Amino acid sequence: MLFQVGGDGTRPTFFEMAAAQQLPASLRAALTYSLGVFALRRSFLHKILDYEDEFYAALMLILEGHSLRTTDASFAESLYGLRRKSVRLRLRKGSGEEEVQHSGLEKRQRILSVVFLVVLPYFKSKLHAIYNKEREARLRESLWGMEDQGFDEADFFTGEEPVVSRGDSGNQELSVRVQLATKIKKFIAVCYPWIHASSEGLSFSYQLLYLLDATRFYSLGLQALGIQVCRATGQELMDTSSRISKIRNHERERLRGPPWLKTVQGALLTCSYAVLDYAQTGLIAAVFIFKMMEWWYQSAEERLTAPTVYPPPPPPPAPKVFISIVAKEGIPLPPDSSLCALCLQKRANPSVVTVSGFVFCYACVFKYVTKYKRCPVTLIPASVDQIRRLFHDT
């Protein structure tokens, strides 16, 4: 079990409660991703993914029911060493102050805890899916209009191919069902955002009050059930182990039938107990190992398939202007920088030799470079393709 250091006595810290609340959602995302990867090789797993909500609800119903029955805690809370206790407030005689008394969970509280942990999240997930589909349908209608629809609503709800001729009674019954389903979807699309916002707002308020030590309840559901989550003490852990053994011995004693049937039933019970005992750490460890291996092989595959990226080459060195050549053999520069060094007149259509950077008249430098294949001043080899016209703003 994972214990969190800190907090006040048996009261869990905010981070313990938040981690226990977020664990089922993280576990569902990891299981869905794992099944999606395995479904690429085993097509029958797509049937599980088609009923993802039902499959996960059934799995959590088994785990939560077993955990509440044996440890008085949810699946995630028992992993963090937490326990659920029934809270009763009584007034002290004389002082008039409220006294908090804790006791074990009642059967009604266990059943309602399963409802809040499994049933309500399942319905919320289905409502969220219906809302998303309705919102996408409205978005398509706003973009493409009402005329172009991808499928017939009647065919969608019946799951059958369109029939040319049908009876009047069948058409009326089908139209009534389609209209009823459409109205229900529109009602959900209108009401679900308000319900979701109210639920999230209440959840945030309770979590903030719990963080500020203003309430003993982490959520509205716990307060409605009269349940407070506390840290499990060493004695409670020992009592839990003894209670689990008593429950299992009592279940073995209730076996009926011939000896061979009792043996088979006992072996099945032993296997189911082992699976349930190691379901917490086993599921988390399996998902962690799978994610680790998937990341490892994905990184190796990316390294093998990624193209080799070479660093960019360094820029070519700048041309060297030899001052001695300019002074001795090259054409000298005129004192006025606005004059052309070749014709000693004011530059007409100024053009630059890119290898050296000196500017001349276009006609002068074009004739010179065509004849001598070099810059007139620096004598650096050049061609007419390296002459660029310059344009001045007037």
Image (tube, rainbow, N blue to C red):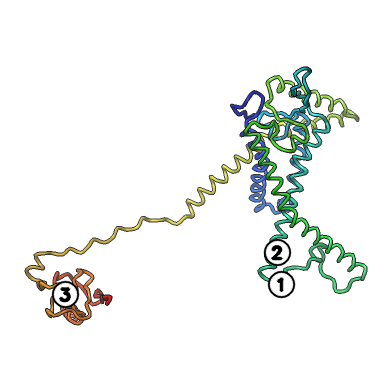
Q: Residues within 10 Å of mark 1 (few under 14, many from 20)?
A: few
Location of residue 385 (image quadrant): bottom left
- Quarter of the N terminus within the rendering: top right
Residue drawn at the location 18% of the way across and 76% of the way down: 360
Location of residue 392 (image quadrant): bottom left
Q: Which residue is mark 2?
A: 138
- Residue 60, how many percent across, how many down? 74, 40
Q: Are marks 3 and 1 in contact (CB under 8 Å)?
A: no
- Residue 384, how many percent across, how many down? 23, 77
Q: Earlier in the sequence, mark 3 or mark 1?
A: 1
Question: Could you tell me the amino acid type at mark 2?
Answer: Arg
- Residue 254, how many percent across, how many down? 88, 27
Residue drawn at the location 50% of the way across and 48% of the way down: 300
Mark sitting on residue 148: 1
Q: Is residue 100 above or below residue 39?
A: above
Secondary structure of the residue carrying tag 1 is loop
- Residue 12, how many percent across, how many down? 65, 29
- Quarter of the C terminus within the rendering: bottom left
Residue drawn at the location 49% of the way across and 55% of the way down: 305
Secondary structure of the residue carrying tag 2 is helix
Q: Which residue is mark 3?
A: 338
Question: Could you tell me the amino acid type at mark 1?
Answer: Asp
Question: Could you tell me the amino acid type at mark 3?
Answer: Ser
Q: Are marks 2 and 1 in contact (CB under 8 Å)?
A: no
